Image (cartoon, rainbow, N blue to C red):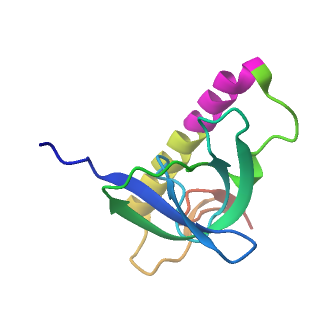
Amino acid sequence: MAKTPYTRIAIVEFPNGKPYNTRCPRTDIVEGCQVSVLMHPSSANPERVDGTVVAIQWERWNCKHVTDLLASEVPDFDLGEDYAKFMEKIRLQAQARHEMRQIYDDLELGDGEDVYLSDGVWLTQHGTLTAR
């Protein structure tokens, strides 16, 4: 009998203080991120609940809830048929952030501080650019 493969799990704490185990396929979602969890995605009435990632683990669990968006990425309108396009945009943004974090890892000095690039532009450990 084959074992269930390991799955990336985000433990998300909701405003009521209760933690939930959720599948989290996005590697750019890390501990401390404000996220939106899709609850009961296969049901007729899925809903989104915002929370904070308190831990990331790899487990052989089959979680029914999915952490697939940062809270800042949740649109304030009904996506309808544009959901696939929206999720593709989110996937591309996540890929870009991952690549920027790889650049940060290559340039940082081991102290966890932001890296100065040029002309007042800094690269954070999260892969974002800031101007100072």
Please name the residue shown 60% across and 28% down the image.
88
Please name the residue shown 36% across and 55% down the image.
61
Q: Position of residue 105 (x, y in %)?
A: 40, 62
Residue 65 is at least partly visible in this image? yes
111 left or right of 123 in image: left
5 left or right of 41 in image: left
In-front residue for pair 13/125? 13
Residue 120 is at least partly visible in this image? no
Where is the N terminus found, in terms of image quarters? top left
23 left or right of 45 in image: left
Q: In the picture shown, does residue 42 fall above or below 26? A: above
Q: Position of residue 106 (x, y in %)?
A: 37, 60
Q: Position of residue 38 (x, y in %)?
A: 65, 46
Please name the residue shown 75% across and 72% down the image.
15
Q: Position of residue 96 (x, y in %)?
A: 54, 42
Magenta residue check for 82: yes
31 left or right of 84 in image: left
> Number of numbered discs present?
0
In-front residue for pair 90/57? 57
Q: Main secondary structure of the magenta part?
A: helix
Residue most extreme to the right? 77
Please give the range of residues in magenta.
Answer: 81-92
Query: Residue 71: which quarter of the image?
Result: bottom right
Residue most extreme to the bottom? 111
Please name the residue shown 52% across and 53% down the image.
28
Magenta residue check for 104: no
Residue most extreme to the left? 1
